[in-house]
């Protein structure tokens, strides 16, 4: 359901949670009690945000993180429009392009790469 936004980072300092987005944006996340900091951080780090969202102690924090863009809801792929993409080479196939394409389409359900796509 939820995923981390890789533009944000979370860290612990003196048993307190902080959020950062680059060098100029750092925020103290004071809604998480000191006794819960480690559990919250580990769940965030391991992308177990769904478990946090189901915990009554963290529901408001999860809503806040979603509102400011630290986390987001994953889209249900089955409801999205499916598209096919093919690359036709004029000349020699590009392994570099093929490898880069694999990186961006690795989450696709059906994925084929090579010089002869069908």
Image (cartoon, rainbow, N blue to C red):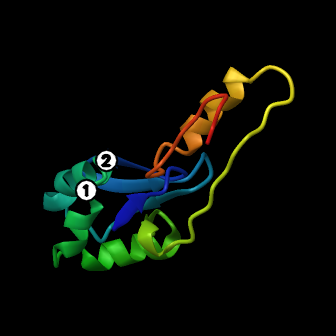
From the viewer's perspective, is 88 left or right of 78?
Answer: right
Camera-side residue: 92 or 57? Answer: 92
Instruction: Determine crowd level at label 1: few under 14, some 14-19, many 20+ residues with C-alpha closer than 10 A.
Output: some
Residue drawn at point x = 17 percent, y = 54 percent: 39
Residue drawn at point x = 16 percent, y = 60 percent: 36
Instruction: Determine crowd level at label 2: few under 14, some 14-19, many 20+ residues with C-alpha closer than 10 A.
Output: some
SS for dot 1: loop
Q: Is residue 39 visible?
A: yes
Task: Give residue 64's position: percent from left, percent from top.
Answer: 40, 76
Task: Give residue 111's position: percent from left, percent from top.
Answer: 51, 44
Q: Which residue is mark 1?
A: 48
Camera-side residue: 29 or 4? Answer: 4
**Contact, CB < 8 Å: mark 1 with mark 2?**
no
Rendered-image quadrant of the C terminus: top right
Residue at the farthest left position: 35
Q: Which mark is residue 45?
A: 2
Residue drawn at point x = 59 percent, y = 48 percent: 22
From the viewer's perspective, is 88 left or right of 57?
Answer: right
Rounded to the nearest angstrom, the CA distance separating label 1 from label 2 is 8 Å
Residue at the farthest front position: 118
Q: Which mark is residue 32?
A: none
SS for dot 2: helix
Using the image, determine if residue 89 lies above or below residue 3: above
- 1 vs 2, front mark: 1
Residue drawn at point x = 24 percent, y = 54 percent: 43
Using the image, determine if residue 111 lies above or below residue 78: above
Rendered-image quadrant of the N terminus: bottom left
């Amino acid at each position: 359901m939820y995923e981390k936004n890789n533009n944000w980072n979370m860290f612990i300092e003196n048993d307190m949670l902080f959020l950062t987005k680059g060098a100029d944006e750092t925020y103290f996340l004071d809604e998480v009690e000191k006794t819960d900091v480690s559990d919250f951080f580990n769940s965030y780090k391991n992308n177990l945000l769904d478990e946090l969202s189901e915990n009554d102690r963290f529901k408001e924090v999860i809503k806040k993180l979603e509102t400011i863009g630290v986390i987001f809801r994953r889209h249900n792929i089955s409801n999205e429009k499916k598209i096919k993409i093919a690359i036709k080479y004029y000349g020699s196939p590009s392994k570099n392009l093929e490898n880069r394409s694999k990186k961006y389409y690795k989450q696709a359900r059906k994925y084929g790469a090579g010089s002869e796509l069908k």
